[in-house]
Image (cartoon, helix red, strand yellow):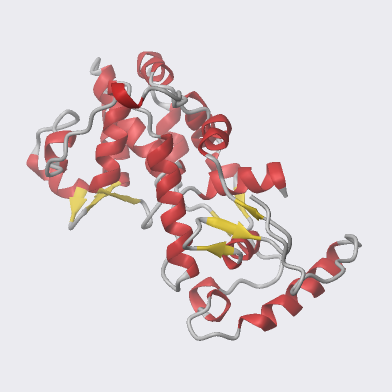
Amino acid sequence: MKRNYSAFAEDIPAYSGPKAARETHADLKQLSAIPRHIYTRPELQILPGQRRFSKMPWLVPMLELLPPASINHLKEWGLSTILVLAKNYNKLVHVWESVTAMVELWHPKTNSFIFPEFEATILLEELEIMLGLPRYQRGQESALSYTIEQINSWSILAYITTKKNDLYSMTSGMHVHLLPIAQWITSQCKRKTTNYTAIAKAAAICICGVILFSEADGAISFGNLSIIDSISEGMKIGQADLGFLYAGLTSAALGGPFYGSVVALELWMGMHI
């Protein structure tokens, strides 16, 4: 949907190199002197040209130990692309200035980026293609059913381990910590156990938690744990991932923390911007 913002539109010069782009970007930041605005928050201040690197040193070494049978399960569940992204996670560089610039344009009420002459948003079909997720087919609405019940994270994690010490280390408050799960996977792989499905489910929690449902450092919520757990049952998670990213953009735009799939946002930016 396009809108004409003639009252605000100005002649925009052609791109003339990185130096001019940085100067223009600095001018735009002067318009953001609003209390709690994203550019006035110290935790998001990054020097020009500086990039924020990922901090999941345990992820790639853990994935390198996965047995072929567990990898096959992940592929059967439609996580082939997510697995590739996770294996290359240490090579990914998030350009945080670009992310914050997009947050500047996000409109919480319309879930869209407001550009001078038009609006744009991340579509479900785009996200499913970019991340290689199982695609939602129009007309399947009547075949879907949802059961609303209290989420019991321990019952989900019990498929991985029933040891209470492990469960206590994996959970706290309303979050599940990914590092203890990765440590459990590593121990299982080094012992060469044959519990391939459990290893695959644990690996799905780790890679989806990092690539799709990134929230706190190395943790996901109970709700997202339940969503990831449904992948092995054939459920489509693209809608949940996109909704979580929308919520994270809205949170950041309103002065809260940013969360959601930075990978998906930057892939979309690469395609369109």
Looking at the picture, how far across and down is residue 201, in whole percent? Answer: 29, 28
Looking at the picture, how far across and down is residue 13, in whole percent? Answer: 90, 66
| Number of dots carrying numbers | 0
Residue 261 can be seen, yes or no: yes
Horizontal side of 14 relative to 210 (left or right) equals right
52 is higher (above) or lower (below) than 57: below
Horizontal side of 236 relative to 39 (left or right) equals left
Looking at the picture, how far across and down is residue 167, in whole percent? Answer: 14, 43
User: For this rendering, which residue is in front, 161 or 82?
Assistant: 82
47 is higher (above) or lower (below) than 265: below
User: For this rendering, which residue is in front, 81 or 128?
Assistant: 128
State the residue at coordinates (40%, 26%): 65
Q: Quadrant of residue 162?
A: top left
State the residue at coordinates (56%, 30%): 129
Horizontal side of 110 relative to 233 (left or right) equals right
Looking at the picture, how far across and down is residue 209, in whole percent? Answer: 37, 43
129 is higher (above) or lower (below) than 173: above
Q: Quadrant of residue 63?
A: top left
9 is higher (above) or lower (below) than 190: below
State the residue at coordinates (82%, 66%): 21
State the residue at coordinates (23%, 18%): 195
User: For this rendering, which residue is in front, 9 or 105?
Assistant: 9
Residue 58 can be seen, yes or no: no
Horizontal side of 51 relative to 37 (left or right) equals right
